[in-house]
Amino acid sequence: MIHSLFIINNTGDVFMEKHWKSVVHKSICDYFFETQSKFSSFEDVPPVISTPHHYLINIYRNNLYFVAVVTTEVPPLFVIEFLHRICDTFEDYFTECTESQLKEHYVIVYELLDEMLDNGFPLAVESNVLKELIKPPTFLRTITDTVMGKSTSVSGILPTGQLSNVPWRRTGVKYTNNEAYFDVIEEIDAIIDKSGSTVICEIQGYVDCLIKLSGMPDLTLSFINPRLLDDCSFHPCVRFKRWENERILSFVPPDGHFRLMSYHIGTQNMVAVPVYLRHTILFREGSSGRFDVTIGPKQTMGKAVENVVLEVPFPKSVLNVTLTPSQGKYSFDPVTKLMSWDVGKIDPTKLPNIKGNIILQTGAPIPESNPVCTVMFSISQLAVSGLKVNRLDMYGENNDKKYKPFKGVKYMTKAGKFQVRT
């Protein structure tokens, strides 16, 4: 399966490597750097790179490349999903998965990689199981390890969940307050043309959970309109047959944070676009141009559109822009030619507007096409697809009135790759 793992930063330094079988020299990354040099954007590097004797399967997250080396035919999505799980685990342990954090916790990183993969095959990938094996870093433990000269983070006892048929949940869990929280998060990927018509609009959705329930609860989660969901993927705890037959999620949950399911809603379901742009971008003969953009809410069902940011990558012939926003503030990078406008919250009664002049290089040809605007936003307490949780029932722990859990559901809509052609 996975032979080796190399972690590479933006400057091309291989600052961490891990080998589960024989050592593969890091010169194998030259094939990766050669492919990377052909692409202008970090995210455009193909996920699978073939070499004479290996395959390099990579992901790009938090300004880091995670490059897995495999020597035999494997399902690429399997390896990609595992690499994302490694990143998620690092974020869970160290708050963020960055180069500085990984370097600061070298020992724990290698201990985690040892436990997550056994001879190249995934072994323990659940966060709550790993935390029984390897304790998360704390200030006191760091001082103790420094003074004693050895690591005290590794447990000498095998996690109880590893010995059961529910390996994702540890036994003997006890909480004073029993709570179950579900976050339904939807990201909109859309392309809007010049006239404001939707070229493509899709939703990538997730159901993230925080479960703090005592004992071994058995939960069922149902939706009001589950037929909306397409191309679903589930946590291993979900009983897939029940979902196929009844469209009900039945599962014994892991303890703590985890992603219960992810889903896709395609253009065939008529996805509503929550924001719109009115734009005028003109490049004139000479050395000037005109920029005028207004952002407004469209179909938000009375919910506020917040954390709005507009990014416009101008052509190389643009020297500067002098703009006046009606709210928020903007910045322009003269090197990358990227204008970023931090709008904030949209007030429907007074729509945010930014306008002003574009300064071009003298004698430079007029750009042939206008830039593509990228919009970022978030809408709280709204799932734009219309998906709603119907009810959550618990079995196994409340039959004899042991406890009644507190249950909460939160909805969130965010922009994924939301682009407007001008």
Image (spheres, rainbow, N blue to C red):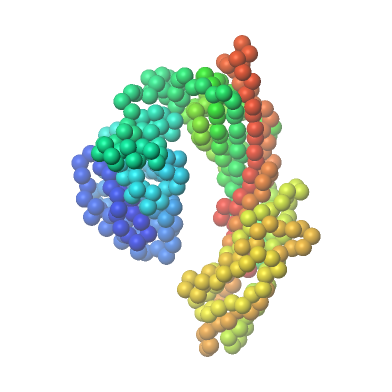
Name the residue rendered at 74%, 63% in the picture: 351
| Residue 173 visible in the picture | yes
Where does residue 203 sit, x and y in percent of width and height?
Answer: 60, 47
Query: What is the residue that sits farthest to the right in this orientation?
Result: 349
12 versus 214 height, above or below: below
Name the residue rendered at 24%, 52% in the picture: 26
Q: State the image quarter where residue 418 is shown.
A: bottom right
Name the residue rendered at 51%, 34% in the picture: 257
| Residue 57 visible in the picture | no
- In the image: residue 279, left or right of residue 253: right
Where does residue 251 sit, x and y in percent of width and height?
Answer: 54, 24
Work out which quarter of the rendered image holds the C terminus and state it: bottom right
- In the image: residue 346, left or right of residue 167: right
- In the image: residue 334, left or right of residue 325: left
Q: State the image quarter where residue 279 is shown.
A: bottom right
21 versus 240 height, above or below: below
Where does residue 368 sit, x and y in percent of width and height?
Answer: 56, 77
